[in-house]
């Protein structure tokens, strides 16, 4: 069985981003970039399924700038067999990305597509669900457990009230939550090997999809700053402040 | 303009987050229709009809909708999408699950987790774990929005007198089925709507130690939350996680105990009115956002707090 893993190049999660002075966006010049953490979890899950013998081939795909090749190489160092970059320097939004991924799904015909539940830059939490809809596939979002058996996949989902388990027919889309697994680190020999694995570069035109953004960003601002308050010296002082100053208890 | 609001519920009661979604719908303007889809959800539809500002309630009561399976719910919403200019759902795990499916099927863009309505086409939303706020505009005739509940004060539960219409559209995609669920049971208030939240982090050491937080919570009528580290370590279940990838809370009072204050955690609680941090490390970043910081060992400070309330 083949698995497709879409991955995204994003600002490293340790970076506290700054808004540009002209409010046109976030300043990404010279900022450390990395694979979106939820995508790392997606790659790891695919690799574990391969190690269990459920999966035979893992294809990683990214839509983005040339530099996203770095993240595809990382995915291959972690265990993906080959990868595809749909190269574009334009802004792409979830619906466009989902359409591009649908075109790749039509070509590759994977039984399972594993994505991150959200990218930590856009925080949209849309792409997997949109792809599932366009491809007519069922979806298991926010997964904390995935079991493939008998032509179906059982997914335990992290929902607001607790956990929910659903069973989906294949092919299906799964999006990863934080507790699905703990991604491994790539070993040096695997990083070297990944350099020789195939990386196909395509353009949106090759896929025949229109990626034109439908939502425009008017401006990006800093959120209201919270200023640090005071340190209290004792529990008594804390209780007093909460009762008489903040009046919240 | 006309707005379709998807009601959040458990087949028995209308979740209060829907009142916030209706508030966002009111800011957009136009007639507001609420869709209640579920199984045996008549009481929810009755409650929705009383909500201030709602002009019509559609009730789709069928086995296919009992567990809010995204495949079936999305097909239903698409079928009913008709002339609505805006389709709104709460940014809960239910809304986040089906709404993008609806958007894709309608070839409409989705704007996630709006925190403000500027006008019918323009919205604000947090990006980068709330470190930036984007104002985005979309001129498409139809759009799908999810609404961050804590950013909108809910409309009144009473005051409306909408009609309830039953919808007999049955959409069962047949590609997914419900197997089971494990829902957390708690007598404490719900995390996202509580006035006071007390959260524990890795500093709590283990799950049993959360008992000292539960005691304080019960005295204050508070909900109990946690950091990702506490959830990952297995101290408490996932539904208690506050943060960028957990729940977003904005109570009057947030007490962070043994939590360092990583940006991903702050993303979920920094809109709280008053923040208290109890941490033994005076350099912990949580103190940079705390109104009141207490540098202390939590195992001494929390029991003392309990005894003084
Ligand atoms: C040059 C450039 C400029 C941009 N400027 C802005 C801007 O100013 N404002 C703005 O809001 N957005 C901007 N974007 C778009 C934004 O960064 C996101 O790429 C887009 O909105 C997708 O949302 P998300 O990543 O939050 O999706 P989510 O739905 O949260 O992503 C979920 C999952 O989908 C998959 N996925 C997402 N994106 C890709 C991808 N590209 N390739 C492969 N898999 C993917 C991953 O598995 C990911 O974990 C820009 C993009 C580019 C390339
Ligand atoms: C993609 C991604 C998403 C994430 N999403 C979230 C999220 O949604 N929510 C979230 O919370 N995190 C999230 N994180 C994790 C986040 O980066 C931090 O790792 C996490 O918040 C740390 O939790 P903590 O503060 O409990 O633990 P730590 O950072 O280990 O802090 C523990 C604190 O307890 C204090 N302490 C220890 N013992 C005592 C004592 N006896 N008395 C008083 N104080 C004590 C210490 O001084 C320390 O400050 C995410 C990370 C990633 C990469």
Image (cartoon, helix red, strand yellow):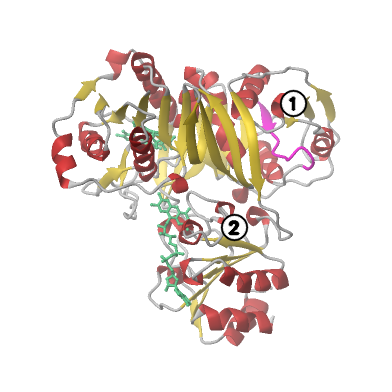
Q: Is B123 placed left or right of B35 in the picture?
A: left
Q: Is residue A29 magenta?
A: no
Q: Residue B63, which numbered label?
A: 1
Quadrant position of the N terminus of chain A in the picture: top left
Q: Which chain carries label 2?
A: B
- Visible residue check, residue A182: yes
- Visible residue check, residue A213: no
**Nearer the N terminus, badge 2 or badge 1?**
1
Regarding mark 2 in the picture, which secondary structure is present there?
Answer: loop
Q: From the top left corner, tell me how far across and down residue B52 is, in percent.
A: 79, 41
| Residue name at image x 74 percent, y 31 percent | B38
Q: Does the magenta stretch include residue B10?
A: yes
| Pointers 2 and 1 within a single chain | yes
Regarding mark 1 in the picture, which secondary structure is present there?
Answer: helix
Q: How crowded is mark 2: few (under 14 residues within 10 Å), some or many (20 or more)?
A: many
| Residue name at image x 59 percent, y 64 percent | B273
Q: Is B272 placed left or right of A178 in the picture?
A: right
Query: Quadrant holding ligand 1?
Result: top left
Q: Which of B134 and B36 is in front in this view?
A: B36
Q: Residue B250, which numbered label?
A: 2
Q: From the top left corner, tell me how far across and down residue B25 is, in percent.
A: 66, 36
Q: What range of the chain is rendered magenta?
A: B1-13
Q: Nearer the viewer, residue B270 or B189?
A: B189
């Amino acid at each position: 069985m083949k698995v497709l893993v879409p991955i995204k190049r994003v600002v490293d999660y340790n970076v506290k981003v700054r808004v540009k002075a002209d409010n046109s966006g976030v300043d990404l010049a010279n900022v450390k970039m990395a694979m979106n953490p939820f995508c790392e979890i997606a790659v790891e899950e695919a690799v574990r399924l391969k190690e269990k013998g459920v999966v035979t081939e893992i294809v990683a795909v990214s839509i983005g700038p040339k530099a996203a090749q770095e993240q595809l190489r990382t995915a291959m160092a972690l265990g993906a067999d080959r990868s595809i970059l749909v190269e574009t320097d334009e802004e792409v939004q979830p619906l466009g990305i989902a359409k591009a991924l649908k075109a790749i799904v039509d070509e590759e015909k994977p039984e399972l597509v594993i994505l991150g539940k959200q990218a930590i830059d856009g925080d949209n939490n849309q792409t997997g669900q949109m792809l599932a809809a366009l491809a007519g596939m069922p979806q298991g979002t926010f997964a904390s457990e995935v079991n493939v058996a008998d032509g179906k996949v059982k997914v335990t989902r992290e929902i607001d009230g607790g956990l929910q388990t659903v069973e989906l027919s294949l092919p299906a889309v799964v999006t990863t939550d934080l507790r699905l697994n703990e991604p491994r680190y790539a070993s040096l020999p695997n990083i070297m090997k990944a350099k020789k694995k195939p990386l196909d570069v395509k353009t949106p035109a090759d896929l025949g999809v229109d990626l034109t953004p439908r939502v425009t960003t008017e401006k990006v601002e800093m959120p209201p700053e919270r200023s640090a308050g005071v340190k209290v010296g004792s529990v008594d002082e804390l209780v007093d402040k909460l009762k008489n100053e903040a009046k919240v208890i | 303009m006309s707005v379709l609001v998807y009601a959040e519920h458990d087949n028995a009661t209308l979740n209060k987050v829907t009142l916030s979604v209706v508030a966002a719908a009111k800011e957009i303007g136009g007639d507001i229709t609420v869709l209640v889809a579920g199984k045996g959800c008549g009481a929810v539809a009755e409650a929705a009809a009383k909500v201030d500002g709602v002009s019509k309630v559609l009730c789709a009561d069928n086995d296919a909708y009992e567990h809010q399976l995204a495949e079936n719910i999305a097909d239903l919403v698409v079928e009913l999408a008709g002339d609505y200019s805006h389709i709104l759902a709460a940014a809960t795990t239910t809304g986040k699950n089906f709404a993008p499916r609806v958007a894709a099927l309608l070839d409409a863009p989705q704007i996630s987790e709006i925190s403000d309505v500027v006008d019918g086409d323009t919205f604000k939303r947090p990006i980068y774990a709330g470190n930036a706020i984007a104002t985005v505009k979309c001129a498409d005739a139809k759009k799908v929005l999810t609404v961050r509940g804590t950013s909108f004060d809910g409309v009144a539960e009473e005051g409306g007198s909408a009609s309830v219409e039953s919808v007999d559209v049955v959409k069962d995609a047949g590609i997914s089925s419900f197997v089971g669920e494990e829902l957390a049971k708690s007598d404490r208030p719900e995390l996202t709507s509580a006035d006071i939240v007390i959260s524990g982090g890795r500093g709590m050491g283990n799950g049993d130690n959360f008992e000292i937080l539960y005691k304080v919570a019960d005295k204050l009528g508070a909900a109990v939350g946690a950091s990702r580290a506490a959830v990952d370590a297995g101290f408490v279940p996932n539904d208690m996680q506050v943060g960028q990838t957990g729940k977003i809370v904005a109570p009057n009072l947030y007490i962070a105990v043994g939590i360092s204050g990583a940006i991903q955690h702050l993303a979920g609680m920094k809109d709280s009115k008053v923040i208290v941090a109890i941490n033994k490390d005076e350099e912990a970043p949580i103190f940079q956002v705390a109104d009141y910081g207490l540098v202390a060992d939590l195992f001494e400070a929390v029991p003392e707090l309990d005894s003084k309330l």
